[in-house]
Amino acid sequence: MRLSEPAPAKLNLALHVRGRRPDGRHTLETVFAFCTDGDLLHAEPADELTLEVIGPFAGALANDGDNLALRAARLLAERAEVAAGAALVLDKRLPVASGIGGGSADAAAALRLLTRMWSIAPDHAQWVAPVLGADVPACLLSMTARGDGAGDELQMVDAGASGAPVLLVNPGVAVSTGEVFARWDGVDRGPLGDWREGRNDLAAAALTLAPAIGDVLNWLGRQGGVHFLRMSGSGATCFALFDDEATRDAAAADCPAEWWRLATFLR
């Protein structure tokens, strides 16, 4: 019996950083949205928990002895007191350290998949998710939601963008989330209302680490049919929402060959 679970790419339609918390994290206001494409996780019953990584970006995780998906599986087994194992295979299609929740989405996929395989209550996964990272609860839900607190206090919202054609573009630069937050200027620029009128408060800091982000944003802004564009998370992936699928596909075809791109839709 082989089960599969998608790990959809995460986008921050807006990301406001309101301050630093006593625990070292930051107070955030964000709107999470998810794509119809991303990584893919497979699992088969086994005596032990193991993980094999395949796919275009498998090499980037070759030396990762503490993969977040495998850590999620181990924590879930411990929490639910499950003695069974699982042979996990992660098809890594999203670039790592790219602001689209790849690792968090993989961990969330592992929680959903193993909850099914082991026939355990979903509340075990809901307990484990925030232990793994602030984005994991949103990725566990994988539906449009507003995130407050450290981004892990969720409220489902209708952003009015479901089904929108979207193009994700990354200039091929991995950006450290920790380094980007460390370079945030500490200025509270105000609360998040309508995400269309919002901003990404990490963009300026990310640009200092990866100036190519500016090239991507400028290129996306010149494409026909774009009505919204922004950097996601801590970068370096940027995205644009298009009027229709045809203009999105035309932009994807013209994207510089050295950049990673994904033409998809919002869930």
Image: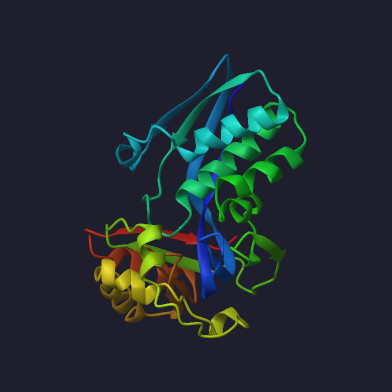
Q: How is the image coloured?
A: rainbow
**Which quadrant of the view contains residue 202?**
bottom left
Query: In this rendering, would 12 be left or right of 258?
Result: right
Residue most extreme to the front: 22
The percent coordinates of residue 249 (x first, y second) are 39, 65
Of the 4 image quadrants, the one containing the N terminus is: top right
User: In front here: 200 or 205?
Assistant: 205
The percent coordinates of residue 4 (x first, y second) are 57, 34
Residue at the spot 34% in from the left edge and 43% down from the top edge:
57
Looking at the image, is 227 positioned above or below residue 83? below
Residue at the spot 45% in from the left edge and 67% down from the top edge:
232
The percent coordinates of residue 50 (x first, y second) are 49, 23
Total tally of numbered discs in the picture: 0
Looking at the image, is 42 positioned above or below residue 190? above
**Which quadrant of the view contains residue 21?**
bottom right
The percent coordinates of residue 44 (x first, y second) are 57, 22
Query: In this rendering, would 14 be left or right of 158?
Result: left
Of the 4 image quadrants, the one containing the C terminus is: bottom right
User: In front here: 144 or 136?
Assistant: 136
Query: In this rendering, would 172 be left or right of 199?
Result: left
Residue at the spot 57% in from the left edge and 70% down from the top edge:
28
User: In front here: 149 or 9?
Assistant: 149
Residue most extreme to the top: 47
User: In front here: 19 or 165?
Assistant: 19
